[in-house]
Amino acid sequence: MKRTFNYTGRQKIKREKISINLIRQNDKVVSFVVNKLDIDDLSLPDDAKVYVEAYYRTELKRFDFWTVNNRSVPMSCDLTDLAYPDNLKFRVVVVNPSDSKILAHADKITPEVPTDRKPILPVEFRDMGNEIWRVEYEGNEDAPILCINNRIPNIQNIAKQDPQFLIYVYPVVIREILTRMVFVDGVDSLTGPSIEWHGDWLRFIIKLGVEFPETLNKNDEYFDKEEALEWINRVVEAFCNTHRNKFYEYVKKLEEVP
Amino acid sequence: MIQLRIMLPEGEEEFRKYIHALRQNSRAPYPNLNAEPYSKECSFHVEVGETEVFRLKEDLAKYLDDTFKKYSVTREDVISAGKGLWTWLAYIWVDQLTNNKQNILKRDEHYICTDPSNYRRYYIHLVAPPYIIYSRYKECQQPIWKLFLYNPPWEINDFTERVAANQFLISHPNVIEAIYHLYFDENSNRPKTNATSRNVRGNVRRFIKVFQHLELTYDMYSLESQQIIDLLPDEFNAWK
């Protein structure tokens, strides 16, 4: 479980209290809208300043959303002067105007995608030298992103359609992510974990039909390391079983080779 | 003059081999990579001089900035062109970037640009960061880009590797201005002596560590550079 020290009383704005969408024209990101920014449950002075920042790597742009009790949308949330607009993340900061201390914040907010299309494992294609793939934990609350090397010819189609890619890569990816969830982050609740992406993955596993151990919280007295590892194996096995046709297809091709 | 090109993977590989060969033999033959499959023409029409001479990184950065402006290419379009652009520029200016083959740096990433997603390695390239930093900060009242661009184009720069490679720091001009005030000597046009030394109190590495604590509490974006300096503890007094 992550430990944090919060000597200054800085409050965290929960992820579900924020909703941001990108606006596109001709498939190019031009601006953003804040559909929801609910900070009413936090103890904040009325005159505290509210800012929303869009950033990626060294690109950063701040937008003034005025004050806690008088929030208004800026004249323009234009993003056209930023490089890499498709990769932008957002940060919300509430600041005490008298001493510039941060009173509340949320970071690494990714824009919303339509719910029925929301992937639990986004894929990004990057130059990764001689590495084929790896999982980076760069999403909201360090959610996983599968990074695949864009130097491989036709990799986007291969990643989507090639059965070999699916049966070689995804089981390992799933095992790694679940190991991280359980043994690094810690899953504090099986029904309503505090980390949103844990919840997305647990719902995915429910659909696979795999039963859960009593707890996946490594700090719980009933947590059993061997049981958790065995559970991860069963999840991977269940995933492979749902794609058994790909496996049969692959084996058949090998058998056909003289 | 030559039309701007983008280095492709095959060209990158050949350029890498050339750099490796140069380290063994300064007379290694220069490969011709100005044709497919090694490189392709850039989508925007810009011509650059192959024989330009840059005394300092600042000169290289200004040259690129002026050139792109002349052809009405925006900064966003330049950065979005990708790492192949910077690798190709390093290829045509390799003599400049190796001090006529007398100073060839050990890491290939100084010449072969990595993906910006790998930002720590991206910022050690000898062409991309000078342009990106200069174009970002050229309008500032103080010439804060000099921190990163004061030395010859073939040399590495501690401020670039420590400060510019930190995404949060480099995206806040007020912070860079504070660092400039603390550590840059405008009389000599170079950083103050021992500014990057580990053994000296209040050096820039310490500034980064202290800053990372301060940013948890304060909205550093909204502070003026002098306010940031005023927040620093006594160990930085000698630099103020």
Image (spheres, coloured by chain):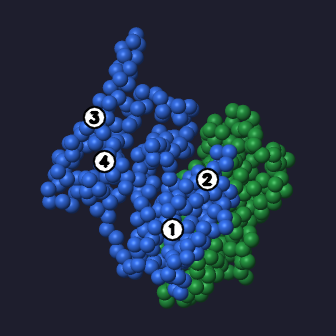
Chain colours: A blue, B green
Q: Are marks 1 and 4 on the same chain?
A: yes
Of callouts 1 and 3, which one flags the residue occurring earlier in the amino acid sequence? 1
Of callouts 2 and 4, which one flags the residue occurring earlier in the amino acid sequence? 2
Residue appearing at x 68%, y 81% in the figure: B185
In the image, residue A19 lies at what x, y percent? 49, 59
Cα distance between the residues tagged 1 and 4: 28 Å
Q: Are marks 4 and 3 on the same chain?
A: yes
As helix, strand or loop, the secondary structure at mark 2 comes to strand
Residue appearing at x 53%, y 31% in the figure: A157
Q: Is residue A54 visible?
A: yes
Q: Are marks 1 and 3 on the same chain?
A: yes
Cα distance between the residues tagged 1 and 3: 39 Å
The amino acid at mark 2 is: Ile
- Against A170, residue B63 (above or below) is below
Is A203 on the left or on the right of B47, as rendered? left
* Residue situated in front as seen by the camera: A37 or A225: A37
* Subunit under mark 4: A
Cα distance between the residues tagged 4 and 3: 14 Å
Of callouts 2 and 3, which one flags the residue occurring earlier in the amino acid sequence? 2
Cα distance between the residues tagged 2 and 3: 39 Å
Q: Which residue is mark 3?
A: A238
Q: Are marks 2 and 3 on the same chain?
A: yes
Q: Residues within 10 Å of mark 3 (few under 14, many from 20)?
A: some
Residues at discs 2 and 4 in contact (Cβ within 8 Å): no
Residue appearing at x 62%, y 43% in the figure: B16
As helix, strand or loop, the secondary structure at mark 4 comes to helix
Q: Which residue is mark 4?
A: A202
Q: Which residue is mark 1?
A: A92
Q: Which numbered dot is residue A23? A: 2
